Image (spheres, rainbow, N blue to C red):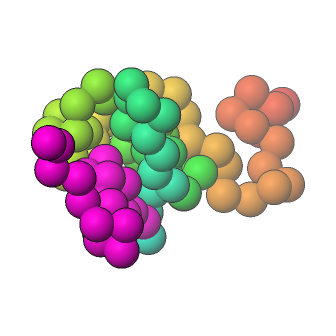
Amino acid sequence: MKDTPEPDAAQTDPTRTALAAVRRHYGDRYTIHHNGDLWVACDRSPCGLTAPTIIEPTLESFVAALEAPGPRFGRPFPPDPGYPGPFLSRL
């Protein structure tokens, strides 16, 4: 005979629990998602100097990348919407 949990017992998914914990800790800076294969975080600040998107296959590497994100490779978006850009400002 199989041991089955009682219907009243709460079934907790460890991935959902981890996702909630990561969102609670890093949610002020990143929007965080998990699609089943990858952990994804997008920086909420368009003017940040760190990588705007972090994608990792494991929770451990994801949290390590959130703790020490790499540098942004391109220029951040200008803070002022009226900013003409580096080329037009020289004209």
Viewer-proximal residue among 24 and 14: 14
Residue 11 visible? The answer is: yes
Q: Which residue is drawn at 44% across and 40% down?
A: 34
Quadrant of the rendered image containing residue 30: bottom left
Residue 21 vertical position relative to residue 74 in the rendered view, above or below: below
Q: Which residue is drawn at 15% across and 50% down?
A: 3
Percent position of residue 12, x then y: 30, 60
Viewer-proximal residue among 68 and 13: 13
Quadrant of the rendered image containing residue 7: bottom left
Q: Answer whether residue 16 is magenta in the image.
A: yes
Q: Magenta segment range?
A: 1-27
Viewer-proximal residue among 22 and 81: 22
Percent position of residue 17, x then y: 30, 60
Quarter of the image containing the C terminus? top right
Side of 53 relative to 45 (left or right)? left
Q: Residue at x 48, y 45 (%)?
A: 33
Residue 64 visible? The answer is: no
Q: Answer whether residue 79 is magenta in the image.
A: no
Q: Residue at x 24, y 59 (%)?
A: 5
Percent position of residue 80, x then y: 74, 59
Side of 46 relative to 28 (left or right)? right
Side of 78 relative to 2 (left or right)? right
Quarter of the image containing the N terminus? top left
Percent position of residue 61, x then y: 18, 34
Residue 44 vertical position relative to residue 42 in the rendered view, above or below: below
